[in-house]
Amino acid sequence: MQSAPFLRIGTRGSMLALAQAQLTQRLLAEAHGVAAERIEIRVITTSGDKLTDRPLSEAGGKGLFSREIEAALAAGEVDLGVHSSKDLASWLPDGMVLAAFLEREDVRDAFVSLKYPGVDALPEGAKLGSSSIRRAAQMLRVRPDLEVVQFRGNVDTRLNKLEAGVADATLLAVAGLNRLGKQDKITAYLDPKDFLPAPAQGAIGIEIREADARTAELVAVLNHAPTATTLAAERALLATLDGSCRTPIGAFTELNGVSCRLTAEILSPDGREFYRGSVEGAAADAAKLGTQLGATLLEQAGPEFQRQFKG
Ligand SMILES: NCc1[nH]cc(CCC(=O)O)c1CC(=O)O
């Protein structure tokens, strides 16, 4: 007789999502001394997966990769959703909480090119493949001559496009490449102080029903406290800046013992205008720091800044 599942994980079906779900499955099985087979992985297709023809920022952006997983959670079909935290909206649906964050991977972006060793080596007018408004804006700031070509799809699709010569270079999260065992594709690492990563990049978040005390307790052992601190800062920043998923936003948190320093910026899509700031304080106040810096950036930018890209 087959024993009942111990837990059911809901995940997207991309290679990266599956790798992240399997990592979570293994950690949960080890922590609780159960066979990994008793932790089910259910693949759920999300709106974001079906959308391959236009940039996510145009289709409603964040949340598109989690909505159907959240519906399965709400319906009690799965117990936990495993997400790339950076793809989550700043506000979760009612009744859902992020109950744990796994230890953060490398937060940096990787420069990937088959022809050029780094950003500075790109010739005048070179093509950068990216559908990320943040990456495009940050690159155009330092290299306004570049031509940005849309590069949608999962990590493999983008690497294939690069190989097919659709662009001269692309930028991908180091975390995703590492998790897929594709670190050999990385040509150079971008300095996270120049190219501030996406808020929450590199962190796997575990979402559950707020009322589900059993799952909350079972996943609590996986929570990595320093990661949770950096995520509290960056997600509070995002929630404060919110309003538009068409605003390029970068954030980078440095933890130093009990002290926390958050640096963030908002940019115009062409990279010509940008507002950057930093706050430092107690790690225990991480969320407050995020809210504070978000408010400071909005004030610096003025009310017209975000409105112009809302479309
Ligand atoms: N937007 C897609 C996405 N969502 C999360 C990652 C990478 C893993 C992570 O940041 O946790 C990626 C791919 C990329 O940006 O290269």
Image (tube, rainbow, N blue to C red):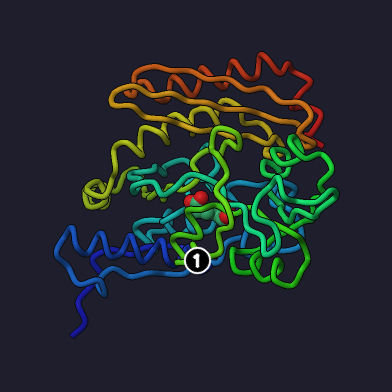
Residue 236 or residue 143, whichever sits in front: 143
Work out whether residue 255 can be spotted.
yes
Q: Where does the image place residue 35, in percent across and percent down from the top left? A: 20, 72
The residue sitting at the left extreme is 33
The residue sitting at the bottom extreme is 1
Crowding around mark 1 (Cα neighbors within 10 Å: few <14, some 14 to 19, many 20+) is some
Q: Where does the image place residue 113, in percent across and percent down from the top left? A: 66, 60
Q: Where does the image place residue 276, in percent across and percent down from the top left? A: 62, 22
Q: Secondary structure at mark 1?
A: loop
Q: Is residue 294 left or right of residue 143?
A: left
**Splitting the image into 4 quarters, where does residue 267 fall?**
top right
**Splitting the image into 4 quarters, where does residue 309 fall?**
top right
* Residue under numbered circle 1: 182
Please report the residue visible at 50 percent of the width from the left and 60 percent of the height from the top: 177
Indicate the amino acid at tag 1: Lys
Q: Where does the image place residue 245, in percent across and percent down from the top left? A: 67, 39
Please report the residue visible at 48 percent of the width from the left and 58 percent of the height from the top: 69
Q: Quadrant of the N terminus?
A: bottom left
Q: Quadrant of the C terminus?
A: top right
Q: Judge whether 141 appears above or below 81 on screen.
A: above
Q: Judge whether 252 appears above or below 301 on screen.
A: below
